[in-house]
Amino acid sequence: MRLLLGLRRAFRPRNARPAYSFSCPKPLLVTGLLLSKLVGLTAHGQQRALGAPGDSARLVVLPAARVTAPPPGWFAAGASFTALDSAALRPTGSLADALALSTPLYVKQTGPGQLASLSIRGTAARHVAVLWHGFTLNYPTLGEPDFALLPTAGFQSATLRRGPAGAPYGTGAMGGAVVLDNALTGPPGVSAVADLTTGSFGLRAERLEGTYRTNRVSSRTVLFERRATNDFPYNPPGYAAGTVRRQVNAAQQQQSITQDVAVRLGPRTELTAAAWLTWADRRIQPTLEAANDHARQQDASQRLLLAGVRSGAHTTATVRVAWLADQLAYASDAVSRSASRSRSWQVQAEEVVVISPTLTLEAGAEAQRFAADVTDYGPAPVTEYRAAAYAAARYTPTARLLLTANLRLARLPGRRPPPLPTLGAEWVLLKAGSHQLRLTGQAARAYRAPTLNERYWRPGGNPNLLPENGLGYEAGLRYAHQTPHWQATASLTAYRLLVTDWVQWVPTRPTGAWSPRNLRQVRSRGLEAEAQATHSGPAGTVSAHLGYALTQAEKTRGYATDPDPAGHQLAYVPRHSATLGLAGARRRWRLALDGSLTSFRYVSASATDFLPGYGLLHTSLTHTRPAGPLSLTFSLRGFNLTNTAYQTLEGRLMPGRAAEVGLRVAWR
Amino acid sequence: MFPADWIEAFIPLVFVLTPSVFGQTAALLPTVFLLTLLTLTGCDPKKKDDPTPVATLTNSVYVINEGTASGGAISLFDKTTRAVKVDLFKDRNGRKLGPFVQSAAIIGERMYVVVNGANRIEVVNRATFDTLTVIRGLDQPRYILPISADKAYVTEWQGAYPDYEPGRVAVLDLRTNTITRRLPVGIGPEQLVLADGRVYVTASYGTALTVIDPATDAVVGTVPVPAGSRNIVRDNTGSLWVLCSQYDTPTDHLVRFRPTAPTVLQADITFPNAYTNGNLRPNAAADRLYVSLSTGTYALPSTATALPPTPLIARNFYGLGVDPQDGTLYAGTASFSADSWAVRYTPAGIAIDSFQVSRGPNGFLFY
């Protein structure tokens, strides 16, 4: 959803009347309350949203919040969402760590803190879009993000949407999308938080956060730094059990600065500015049995945003302008220097109109200009323009039925991808006492525009490459139960996703250069189950969660020039994956145990060699105590407690047992 | 391999924590969930136990699979039973060979496997594939040429792309498996050949071959060639054929000259840059040569002065081998995202059959 995530609760005047920016609060409030009951979310830190409309719960339970735009999911009935919040987002970790820890998604990592990509519903790394204030953070050159370079210090919470979502999120959201939320929350006045972490393998991390809030202005500044030597020990395969080596060339450091400001210019006008700067300097871990080639990669990204929102009687208009720039420099014993520099201007304008208590519409447009200087594109920089128009509707004909529709019309250089519609529905099947059961369904198209690398790489770049197209369906059941002491949700989703014109690099005639071609069709089918229960009583809170994904993804059709065979599970897509967690909180103590299970993964398209299945177990213990005006939180975390040797990509080692000690000092 | 201790760690906790909160009967549910999940995620596929081919003289073909950054492999093909063992080294030694297995040579009862991405040579017992020793300290090693029972030469690149520096030839003492000397050669040295008491070393980014006297391990001169050279073979007349192809030049050359008169080219066949691994290979009699270009795989007599108008096989191959016993062609397909195939052809270019190997087969050794 191209929505103003950062502005949702951007401004919270103390004396303002409860405001819902669509300006006809009552009927919508009713809808919101109904939905909040349906989903039954609580403000508990462990919450796992099962349906996006649940976010509307937060709209109404915070009466002082001024809401300037609908939350993600407002126009996405029937879509599958998972919220990652405080418990999953370790203050000094990365988005890759958070996703690996708390979702059954397969996070592919070339090592701890090294290049991390995601496979959602059997799709490839380039088939997930990461959105910051409505703009995609995927590198325009590569088409995918590096989840290890997105420290959790850069955002407040994240919502994972599984399934194709081309209409709301644009290019790349084929398997799903991760929407980062930078809502400006916190107490009025000045407050500050410092997090200090130290841990195994030379880990040191610091995070400093300061917020300032008045009736007119909200501001948050976050500074973050993390460094690790990553010289973790391992027993090399093929050597005696006692043989221990230490990982070489894996040290890294990264920094991040985030600044969010919201200024209320008038009773109905707000201005938001945001900046997110990140730097990373990583030694690139060689593969097992490879020579240490002393590879080093330095990344930097600058993201700047300016947005304005104006609310009318029945409308909310938003204009956003962003400047996004990424630089990458790589060097090793084998490559003396490879550099890539890209930047883009992006602008979005949209308007949300409340037609009636049961009907909300949205319409918007965006334009993007990309420019890139890449060693392998040749001496001249390349530029490219893209544009899109989009619209969405949300309709609640009865209290039990919710319907949404989205459409995006995109324009690429020399190409017009087919229209991208999304249709979704949710129906309250059963409502008995504190129990709710909803039936959900969605059909969606998605696309991925050819990346700059695919178009301009020399040799082999293919300017005639077609966008990849996805068509997905899903249906699910969502259960919710809420009593004063109990809160439980469960969901089961079945999906089918067909990707056509899937791009593969193959050697081509006459020069033999590798070139991307639209070569194949890939079908992914699966089941996703999530369940969580929380019991709150006078003695404390206990919660448990479980997530499971069955993923069957295979190439179903290809051209003769595509060397990969059809009919096998795709490489690095586990058929089964699960996460399990237990947490208990009592007085000032909290203990959590998180586990994940991942079945075997083939390492090539031939489905012959594989990496064995593995299980990981992590734990955390935190204790909070006041100290004068301060609040101190001590934390102890243990990772991979069973010291399991595992790899998410063949030959790329991951660390064994590790520990982390943290101290959080919060002032006000 | 599934960590059993994981179950031991998790299940008691479920039993302890869950009943206290959710009631006794509810404890069954997560346990059933857990056990189901453990079963689902813990089952790895069983490896098929193919009848393992045993290397026997004149009946065995070793396939060199270059592989990817996660490792390469040596496969064994039995010509009689057509059985294939895909990864001899890993099956025997429990670890992979390392990234980019560039070449290998059978020397006596050993095989020397040049692992480019590991900067080393793995020395194995050819019959059992047990690892014998590892020769380290090489820099981007490419090809190995046995000079005598006690000595071999290994080409090494120096520098990093695109700033390559003059390469070198490492002199290997096969008795001790140590490097005894290093000789300076051209930039990006690739294949090398022994002809009439001299070793000729190619240079990818140079316009000269380096000539070495193997008796003294001394560089004794250079031979000019039209462009960067990569493949070199000796034909039945004693002439040398050199395939020259340089990434940044538009024209490739296939040249032939006599070692005694290297400046007089007996043939200089030119074609647009179409190297893609080249694979210039002679048959056993060395009266016929094969070369695999992106326009196809060609066969030409050692007297040729031009490429045939049509290729023998209208395909390019990543690797090519000629069986010295019967002239059968072994051709490797270029797939790195999936296991590749070795396709067999008659000397007339008619496909016989194929067998699946590992990724990126770039060469064949006949034993």
Image (cartoon, coloured by chain):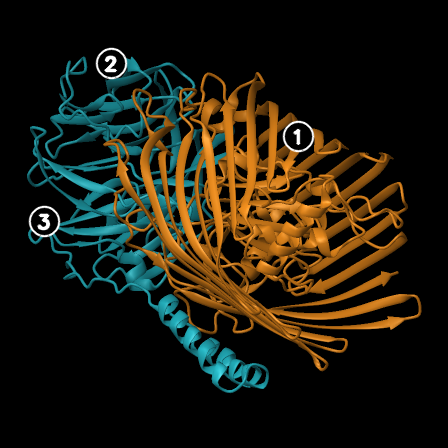
Chain colours: A orange, B cyan
Chain under disc 3: B
Question: Quick one: label 2, few (<14), some, or many (20+) residues within 10 Å?
Answer: some
Cβ–Cβ under 8 Å for marks 3 and 2 = no
Q: Quick check: B364 left or right of A300?
A: left
Chain under disc 2: B
> Which residue appears farthest toward the right when viewing the image?
A628
- Please give the label number shown on residue A468: none
Could you tell me which secondary element the residue under label 3 belongs to? loop
- Kind of residue at disc 1: Glu
Quarter of the image where one finds residue A132 = top right
Quarter of the image where one finds residue A641 = bottom right
Quickly name the residue at label 3.
Answer: B79
Q: Nearer the viewer, residue A157 or B172?
A: A157
Above or below, A200 relative to A108: below
Foreground mark, 3 or 2? Answer: 3
Quickly name the residue at label 2.
Answer: B269
